[in-house]
Amino acid sequence: MTTYPKNAETRTFRVVGLPGDGIGPEVYASACRVLSLLEKTHGLAIQLDEQLIGGAAIDATGDPLPQATIDACERSDAALLGAVGGPKWDGNPADKRPELGLLRIRARFNLFCNLRPIVTHPALHSFSPIRPERLENVDLMIVRELTGGSYFGKKWRNDEEAEDVCRYTREEVERVTRAAALIAQQRDRRITLVDKANVLETSRLWRAVASRVIEEEFPDVQMDNMYVDAAAMHLLTRPADFDVMLTENLFGDILSDEASMLCGSLGLLPSASLNGDQFGLYEPVHGSAPDIAGQGKANPYAMLLSVAMMLRHSLGCNEEADTLEQAIHHCWNEGILTTDLRADGFTTSKVTDAVCNRLADTVPA
Ligand code: NAD
């Protein structure tokens, strides 16, 4: 996770576009507009290769992750996904469910490192259920291991008993710890390892392996440990104290949803899932929101922040990522929000217009 794509110097990149279902294509259209503007204003060349995933792929090919989509990802630097799923496919058999496309792409490309930034912004404090004074200066990155633990361990159930095996290997812990440390080096150089080492053997392995990796390979990064129950409390009482939070799959799933409440709306939260070769799948945290699909009400900010993450983590375009985030923050300050946040809010395309206008005003000299 240290080198950028070989085409970083020419600033020419291939990105697979996966609009998906429901509001997926609507927020994906916003992302395309922003990328196309960045090409004009910032000298990037991004070849978008649009492919099918989820329900749209089932309808067209019978498969939620067609081979053509896998092939396109193999040729690309990153993939940008809207969302998958919806009531139309709810009754489908297990091998024809839209969500399977997502799980398979994560497994196929070994996307073991899930990043969820949680950043509060003063203009949005009033939308969070947490007291505003606790939201000041919150800027934390949750690094969740995404391809191991009890979600992927052996499972069985009968009428009397059930078991989900939680297994981690040294190598799995090492690689995600290194990824977290590299991210910490670009931030405040502090990692909180969240576990349950007072009870679980897997947590004790995590502590031993992660501490050794940090000590031997990242002496400039400071790591402390916190039990997951304490972390769940501290996330709400003193969220600004965290820099990078590193944790295993199940704990990360729960804590990242809890932390999302600090920001106020699902429509504001981006995510990235990375492998060790700089390829990443970038997507909003929200789903396909079938209740508002096709009405122009989708909040595009989570998707646009996912584009910024893609520029930074897979394409090495840090300056463009910063510029896009600054344009988004400017729009928040101006109250340019969709109806999930204010009753008299703007449509998806009006919000996208505002972000594009701001970007156009910040063309480099
Ligand atoms: P959801 O995130 O789609 O919607 C939850 C609520 O938040 C809805 O009221 C919705 O209108 C609102 N919402 C979500 N995103 C929004 C946005 N950008 N702007 C404005 N409002 C927004 O979750 P759900 O209703 O539980 O799931 C709907 C479908 O999405 C299901 O089929 C589910 O399986 C799927 N899903 C997909 C993903 C993914 O693609 N990564 C993630 C979660 C859920």
Image (cartoon, rainbow, N blue to C red):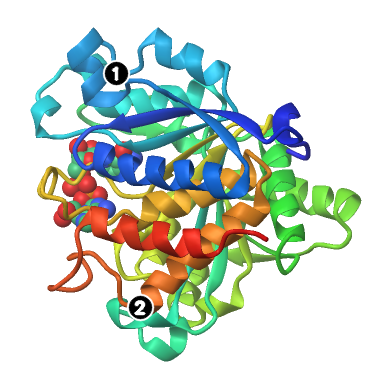
Q: Is residue 124 above or below residue 320?
A: below
Alpha carbons under labels 2 and 1: distance apart = 40 Å
Query: Which image quadrant for residue 110?
Result: top right
Residue 29 can be seen in this image: yes
Q: Name the image quarter holding the N terminus.
A: top right
Q: Is residue 300 above or below residue 280?
A: below
Image mark for residue 25 = none
Q: Amino acid at mark 1?
A: Pro
Q: Is residue 307 above or below residue 61?
A: below
Q: Describe the element under mark 1 as helix, strand or loop.
A: loop
Q: Describe the element under mark 2 as helix, strand or loop.
A: loop
Q: Amino acid at mark 2?
A: Glu
Q: For this rendering, which residue is in front, 13 or 258? A: 13
Residue occupying image coordinates x 26% and y 18%: 57
Question: Which residue appears farthest toward the front when viewing the image?
Answer: 365
Mark 2 or mark 1, which has the lower sequence index? 1
Nearer the camera: disc 2 or disc 1: 2
- Decide if residue 317 is on the left or right side of residue 200: right
Say which residue label 2 marks: 334
Can you give x and y, in whole percent of width and height, for residue 35 in the image? 47, 43
Q: Residues within 10 Å of mark 2 (few under 14, many from 20)?
A: few
Query: Which image quadrant for residue 111?
Result: top right
Can you give x and y, in whole percent of width and height, for residue 107 in the image? 49, 24
Mark 2: is the Cβ under 8 angstroms from ligand 1? no
Q: For this rendering, which residue is in front, 340 or 351? A: 351
Say which residue label 1 marks: 64
